[in-house]
Amino acid sequence: MAAKRSRRTTKMYRRRSSRFALGLLLYFGLMLGAFALVWRYMPRLAERVGHIEFGWLRFSIYFVVYVLLTLGLNVAIRRIPLGLRREGQLRLGFAVATTLSAAVAVYQARFGTGLSATYFTVGVLGAFVGMLYVTHRTFGLVEVNSPPSPEEVEAVLSGHHGVVLADDLWDHTKRVIEILLAGALIILSLPISIVLAMVIWLQDPGPLLFAKVVVTRGGRSFRQLKLRSMVKNAEQTTGAIPAALDDQRVTFFGQMLRRTHIDELPQMINILWGQMSLVGPRPERTVFVRRHLQHWPTYAQRHAVRPGLAGMAAVFGDYYSVPREKLRYDLLYIKRRSLGLDLRLFITALLVALVGIWPGMNRGRRRFIGRRQEERWRRAYEALHGGTPDSLRPAREASGRNAPRGTARERVPEVREHPLT
């Protein structure tokens, strides 16, 4: 058996090596053709476009040329029977177009205007936009994992009838401030957002954004945007579950995004659209909210305000706090929300994101949280998913010799009164 498995592994390795060699050969072949095109047609294009004094128009024409060239490369690569996966074909096309832009930049530095860095940047952006169009047609640019059914969305919305929405002076002032800040941050973070999008796409060509369907003010559902930090279709077989401690679905670069919380940068768009706030209860998935409403009707009261990037439950609790613990913090925030509290929560959340601790958190507290992370993940899984994760079940239970004594719904007590009273 071991010898057979070893032969199978060796055969698979040889097959991958041959595909890589063929892909490398195809890359050099396409590059020779690209250099020939540059040498022949670049002077003609420079003659017709180079005299345009308006720089933005001139480089916009070059940008469109690169987009069209990238689309043509994609068609050519797909017609060659190489046996590459779709992701490999997309990477190959982008690599050829990027190398071509480097050749054009060298040509401009030697014989042209000297704006080699600008020509290279325009070429890379044009190639990336072309590949994004192909990616959109193949995979889509926004991946929505485990979306709720229309019946679940309607059930959550009907469960919020009678909830008094927050509508005082601070709420209106806060909304104006958030529109200004979100718009400024979107503009200022555009360069780094483009770089992050390229890295995400190169590591795993596919959707750039991940969207969770969550609940906002009044029980309405919306798509909470994040930079994709997992592989494609991460919840196709498992459904909506909380991320585990060593989640194999998270990519290498995705771990860095999650550790620094940069993956939440696209939520500035949600804030600009009025679906989220800078400070407020953390958004919860629609499928989970429906389950919580069945146990705690008062859970709807947390949606009297918009959900936020930073919240009291996220600052003073942790990611794996059970919903009942988060609900206490959220209702306390709604009761005491003010400018001072929002500033304190936002600054503290920023410190937690940057250094991993908050003011007043001693070493003993950090060690206690670290030791109980696995147990807290298990409790969060049970409360959200309605059952025990298979990876944590005892071996005899998984084999069927001993049935579980109860589910998470039986163990979580029902809260009928306001948690703050």
Image (cartoon, helix red, strand yellow):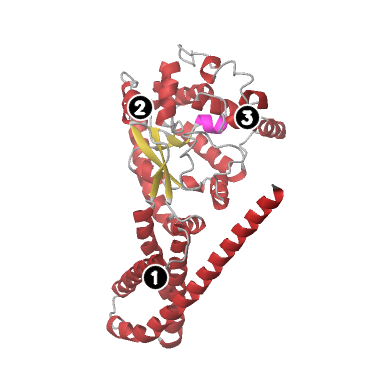
Q: Which mark is residue 152?
A: 2
Q: Nearer the viewer's eye, disc 3 or disc 2?
A: 3
Using residue 24 as the reference point, say whether residue 8 is left or right of it.
right
Look at mark 3 in the image and give the residue it sits on. 392
Q: Nearer the viewer's eye, disc 3 or disc 1?
A: 3
- Graded by Cα atoms within 10 Å as few (under 14), some (14 to 19) or many (20 or more), the crowding at tag 1 reads many
Q: Earlier in the sequence, mark 3 or mark 2?
A: 2
Q: Earlier in the sequence, mark 3 or mark 1?
A: 1
Look at mark 1 in the image and give the residue it sits on. 122
Disc 2 secondary structure class? helix
Mark 3 to mark 2: distance in Å? 29 Å
Residue 71 appears in the picture as rendered? yes
| Residue type highlighted by circle 1 | Val
| Residue type highlighted by circle 3 | Leu
Q: Which residues are magenta?
A: 312-318
| Residue type highlighted by circle 2 | Glu
Q: Main secondary structure of the magenta part?
A: helix
Q: Which residue corresponds to the image point at 33% horizontal and 29% vertical from the top-left?
A: 153
Q: Looking at the image, is 48 positioned above or below residue 5?
A: below
The image shows residue 12 at horizontal and vertical percentages of 59, 57
Q: Which mark is residue 96?
A: none
Disc 1 secondary structure class? helix
The image shows residue 222 at horizontal and vertical percentages of 35, 36
Disc 3 secondary structure class? helix
Q: Nearer the viewer's eye, disc 1 or disc 2?
A: 2
Mark 3 to mark 1: distance in Å? 51 Å
Asked if the stretch drawn in magenta spans residue 147, the answer is no
Q: Earlier in the sequence, mark 1 or mark 2?
A: 1
- Graded by Cα atoms within 10 Å as few (under 14), some (14 to 19) or many (20 or more), the crowding at tag 2 reads some
Using residue 12 as the reference point, say whether residue 302 is left or right of it.
left
Q: Which residue corresponds to the image point at 39% horizontal and 82% vertical from the top-left?
A: 38
The image shows residue 54 at horizontal and vertical percentages of 29, 75
